[in-house]
Image (tube, rainbow, N blue to C red):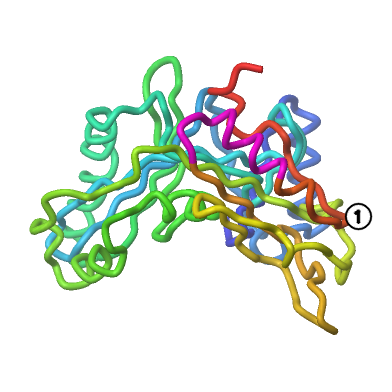
Amino acid sequence: NGLAAGKGVIICNSFNEAKDAIDKCFKEKSFGNAGSTVIIEEFLEGEEVSLFALVDETGFVLPLITAQDHKKILEGEKGLNTGGMGAYTPVPSISDTMMEQLSNQFIEPIVKHLKKENIDYKGMFYAGLIMTKSGPQLLEINVRFGDPETQAIIPLLETDLLYLLYSSATGKLNEIKNIKWRDQYAMTVVMASKGYPESYDKLIPITNLKNLKLSNKDYVFHAGTKFENNEWISNGGRVLNFTSLGEELSKIRNNIHDLINLIHWEEGYYRKDIGWRYINE
């Protein structure tokens, strides 16, 4: 029930797996103090969607965009949960109208309740939803941007981010008539250290990074890196984020893979199936 860097959820497919998960928390102390209390809840099956909105102290909710994270370490949504191995935005199956409906259904009531409790929340509101056969369900709430969703979202935004955040901070979100986005998709692929989210080696050289030729639609965001002795080295679990923009998710992903293949990092790992729900290959 504590902070676990996005890795505190264990999906169990049997009683024995559930028992092992509890032992991991209480006996092995795998999550430290964060695992001293556990929550056991129903497993919900469906497509996950991250819905982002800005809120101000008046209770005004401004929906922004949707994205889809890929939490599992292995391709095919297998293996352990991670902080996120990749994301893309917007989610093709969620129209602007549906995004408004989801915001009205899940975010608005929570913000109204906060007002009722005299909590003047303002800032980012991130609802983690799952689209089940019986309808959308709320999985989690975060009062921050998502990682790696943000690395895909921000390059699509054409409206000044500072203007949006300042409007949220000063209670003027209702004055924003339109948010301008690039009419494209964006995808981020995370490159992690082999062994993540468990044990992994650090301080491994990553070469050829500075020689990458990036177009104005390509970005490389550093996360767990360190610059030492005139070279980049790994210094964490999730190390690099490769983001690219374009009209087709399949072409965007291929472009990212081409960029990743230009660098040399023996201990690097990435999922090759980011966006699999909407890419037919």
The verdict on residue 254 being magenta is: yes
- Characterize the magenta stretch by its predominant secondary structure: helix
From the image, tell me which residue sits under label 1. Answer: 266
User: Measured from the top left, where is residue 213 in percent x and y?
Assistant: 66, 57
x 79%, y 72%: residue: 232
User: Measured from the top left, where is residue 9 in percent x and y?
Assistant: 63, 45
Q: Is residue 256 left or right of residue 49?
A: right
x 75%, y 60%: residue: 237
Closer to us: 172 or 134:
172
User: Measured from the top left, where is residue 153 in percent x and y?
Assistant: 43, 50
The segment highlighted magenta reads 246-258
Q: For label 1, count other residues whose C-alpha is less than 10 Å away and answer few (under 14), some (14-19) or many (20+).
A: few
| Residue 14 quadrant | top right
Asked if one can make out residue 123 in the rendered structure from this viewpoint, the answer is yes
Q: Secondary structure at mark 1?
A: loop
Asked if one can make out residue 119 in the rendered structure from this viewpoint, the answer is no
The verdict on residue 114 being magenta is: no
User: Measured from the top left, where is residue 3 in percent x and y?
Assistant: 58, 62
Closer to us: 281 or 69:
281
Residue 280 to residue 152: above or below: above
Q: Is residue 14 left or right of residue 5?
A: right
Q: Quadrant of the C terminus?
A: top right
